[in-house]
Image: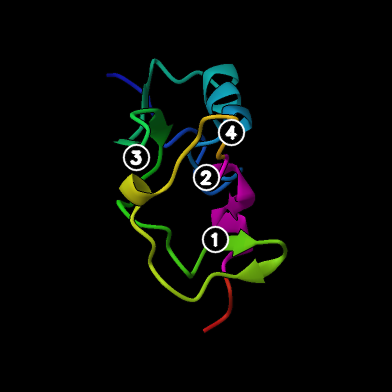
Amino acid sequence: MELQGHRGARGVLPENSIPSFKSAIQTGADSLELDIGMSRDKQIIIAHDTTLNPDIVRQKGQWVTERLPIRSLTLRPQHRKVLKYSASASLLRKL
């Protein structure tokens, strides 16, 4: 039987994060499952959704209000649009 860390240690730490992947490995996961996308400037991004999910994504402490496509954002230092967002299942807004 194989123990898989689905998006890392989802439910314990923010999914698809380095701490979550490390925790899954430390607790015995044999493999890690993650989803990837690509930014406008062709950078690989670990993300489950193809858009920024307003239920779990903040920008400067405020919930985003629209589903921005990840492919429309950039990651390169001269743009850094992706790095302005924070996503975490532990930040789920109460609906």
The location of residue 73, given as percent across then percent down, is 42, 47
Nearer the observer, disc 1 or disc 3? 3
Name the residue type under label 4.
Gln
Which of 25 and 90 lies nearest the eye of the viewer? Answer: 90
The residue under label 3 is 40
Nearer the observer, disc 3 or disc 4? 4
What residue is rendered at 35% in x and 50% in y? 72
| Rendered image quadrant of residue 94 | bottom right
Marks 2 and 3, Cα distance to the nearest angstrom? Answer: 10 Å
- Residue at the farthest right position: 61
Badge 2: residue crowd in 10 Å (few <14, some 14–19, many ≥20): some
Mark nearer the N terminus (1 vs 3) = 3
Name the residue type under label 3.
Arg
Residue 78 numbered tag: 4
- Residue at the farthest bottom position: 95
Which of 78 and 22 lies nearest the eye of the viewer? Answer: 78
Query: Range of the magenta residues?
Result: 80-92
The residue under label 2 is 82
Marks 3 and 4, Cα distance to the nearest angstrom? Answer: 13 Å
SS of the residue under disc 1: strand
Nearer the observer, disc 4 or disc 2? 4
Q: Is residue 26 left or right of residue 95?
A: right
Callout 4 touching callout 1 (CB < 8 Å): no
Callout 3 touching callout 4 (CB < 8 Å): no
The location of residue 56, given as percent across then percent down, is 52, 62
Nearer the observer, disc 4 or disc 1? 4
Name the residue type under label 1.
Val
What residue is rendered at 58% in x and 74% in y? 93
